Amino acid sequence: MSDIINEDRIQLEKLASTIFSDPHLLEVERLGGMTNRTYAVTIKSGKYIFRLPGEGTEVLINREHEKISTELASSLGIDAPLIYIDAKSGIKISTYIKDAVTMSSETLKEPQNVKDAARLFYSLHTCGTDTGIPFEVFEMAGGYEKIIRDNNVSFYEDYPDIRREIMAIKEEVDLLSIPKAPCHNDPLCENWVRNDERMYLVDWEYAGMNDPMWDLADLSIESSYDKDLDDMLLYSYFNRTPTSDEILRFHANKIYLDFLWSLWGKTRAPYDGEPMEEYALARYVRLKSNLKAFTYL
């Protein structure tokens, strides 16, 4: 760890000297994160977050797309003020959120946090900006299916039947002609932070144009909401009782989420072994449970 920090410190110093007029690093603190290396850096003018992308992330993440979405989120006040982002390297510097606390499944169940998250999503989804960045769930799923076949990874025995049910739901939902909006698409609990004043949503690597109900369904899935919390989330988002079509889309997107990410887990199984098989299976089991519940809407 110390070697990594020492190597990164040189890069942090170079970045600070390029971006700031007072580049001397007074304090450097390594923060969490598996893919990227993120630091809280204090210089004379203040405290900032420096993100150095992990090796290989350039293959997984379109940094130009991320730059567009991050700049939008920052301009809307949804993410912290952005200081610098490089669309080629993925290096990013943003203002440090004072007294920020990372959310968890439990804290995101607190009524005030449910309401604040809903309002933040609404601000994003209704901003009127078309980022031009696609997030095509079923195209992505098709790509994952091909990877699974090419790597001779076994599908679940009932997958063909389950897939047909999902596609039937897609046909029903597609008839609603839903306009797409800028979405975060990956609102994991760890991507929410708040201080005494407000909530923020960070890390826009997977952002793109999608059905806004995806974001709400994703928050519900990741935070293990029950029906009461789902109702609170939807009411807070619309500031009214949702329509039957909106409820249909919300629950359909719960199914789409686990459909997509269970396939993603299967693509990773040859590389990451049993943990990814367990991840994929857990998603698939919940998918089937939500499919059954969908028939009673």
Image (tube, rainbow, N blue to C red):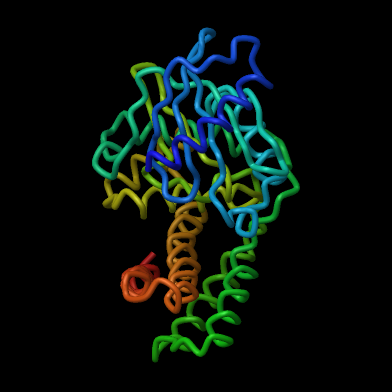
Front residue of 59 and 202: 59
Point 46% across, 17% down: residue: 42
Camera-side residue of 195 and 243: 195
Q: Is residue 246 left or right of residue 76?
A: left
The x, y position of residue 295, in whole percent, is 39, 72
Q: Residue 93, how many percent across, how many down? A: 58, 28
Which residue occupies the foreground of this view, 117 or 81? 81
Rendering quarter of residue 123: top right
Q: Quadrant of the C terminus?
A: bottom left
| Position above or below: 21 against 281 | above
Residue at x-position 64% and y-position 49%? 208
The image quarter containing residue 278 is: bottom left
- Residue at point 51% right, 90% down? 152
- Give the residue displayed 60% in from the left and 33% down from the top: 92
Measured as percent of width and height from the top left, residue 90 is found at 64, 42
Pick the residue in front: 129 or 188: 188
How far across and down, in percent of the image, does residue 1 sit? 37, 43
Numbered label tally: 0
Left or right for 139, reference 169: right
Q: Is residue 25 above or below residue 69?
A: above
